[in-house]
Image (cartoon, coloured by chain):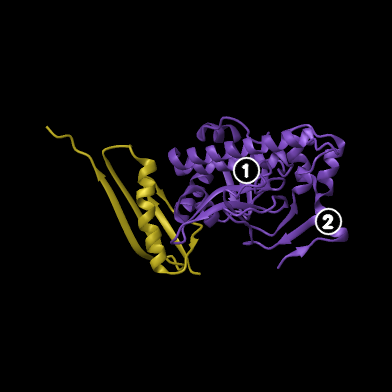
Chain colours: A purple, B yellow
Amino acid sequence: MIRTVVGTDLPSPNATILRMGGLAPLSSCEADILRDLPRQARIHPAQTELCREQQVQPPLVLLSGWACCQRILGDGRRQILRFVLPGDAIGSLAQPVLPASSTTVALTQVVVADARPLLRPSDAAGAPWAGLTKAIAMMSHVDEIILRDQVVRLGRQTAYERLIHLILELHGRLQAIDMIDGNSFSVPLTQDILADALGLSVVHINRTLQQVRRDRLLDMRGGRITIHQMDAMRRVADWVGSIAA
Amino acid sequence: MPKFFFDIIDGDLIVDDVGTDLPDFSAAKNQAVSVLPDIARDELPGGDERVFQVTIRDEGGKPVFKATMSLCCRLLD
């Protein structure tokens, strides 16, 4: 069921403003465009397909909730390519008229907004918004870095390294949108989702979570990750820097 | 879905105190068998004699299945 958000229930544009503003300085007019996005927002339940691979559809911005880009093989095996967090685009803002490069599915209930207002010109002469244009280019660049990190994780890292590297990635990305609380943050990640993101079996994920807990690097329980030893985690995972900005 | 516990030996014994929800025993068995080469890939190389073993316990704690995978290396003259 799709619901249009109305009246006082308008979702916050804060994640989007933090995300885009973290990628490039925005003018107050540009920030106002982002502030107005929730007026056209829609709520979708978990499991909704928000965008389908190879189809052309207007890009969206995720205002709240989590989604993922994924591909499912003929026999049902799933590879999650990357997580989509609040403030991220669904579909490409940089290439809005090209077919989508992957299918995006909601992992939780999500609120999404039509992203086309970001692509409209700033004046009658058709000039683009300078800050938004740069932020959109940066967003594509960061998406590519995230994808490269995923290739290295899946291709060369051990289960232990993969899990820690992914958690460092999520920590950095959530920090950029102010969704970290001290040294912990909430994640809607089940063992199944982690297994499909990291190319591991559910049992292997379970074992690896117990290993990182035993080694006192981090804890994951009740939908919450608590980081105990950030520096040690960075060393283990060959972490080269925050990709959030 | 029933919960199964997978105790894994890869040098150390890691007792599973969390468990994994799976549709049935057959799915649990498939998980147990497929996790062994995955763990071996991460843990090798690490010695000439390695044994990787997984034991499945049911919800009552009773062991119901065991699978073992071993590596033996030998220098040839």
Image quadrant in which you'd find residue A33: top right
Question: Which residue corresponds to mark 1?
Answer: A170
Query: Closer to the camera, B16 or A127?
Result: A127
Give the residue type that dot 2 points to.
Leu
How dense is the environment of label 2, judged by Cα within 10 Å: few (below 14), some, or many (20 and up)? some
Is the C terminus of chain A in the top left, top right, bottom left or bottom right quadrant?
Answer: top right
Label 1 or label 2, whichever comes before in sequence order: 2
The residue depicted at 83 percent of the width and 40 percent of the height is A31
| Residue A50 drawn at (x, y percent) | 65, 57
| Residue A7 drawn at (x, y percent) | 88, 60
| Residue A65 drawn at (x, y percent) | 70, 54
Foreground: disc 1 or disc 2: 2
Residue A216 seen in this snapshot: no
Residue A200 seen in this snapshot: yes
Q: Disc 2 is attached to a residue of which chain?
A: A
For the residue labelled by badge 1, is the local secondary structure a helix, a strand or a loop?
helix
Is the N terminus of chain A in the top left, top right, bottom left or bottom right quadrant?
Answer: bottom right
Q: Disc 1 is attached to a residue of which chain?
A: A
For the residue labelled by badge 2, is the local secondary structure a helix, a strand or a loop?
loop
Figure check: A180 above or below A43: above
Question: Which residue corresponds to mark 2?
Answer: A10
Figure check: A169 above or below A220: above
Figure check: A168 above or below A78: above
The residue depicted at 49 percent of the width and 40 percent of the height is A151
Q: In the figure, is residue A102 to the left or right of A154?
A: right
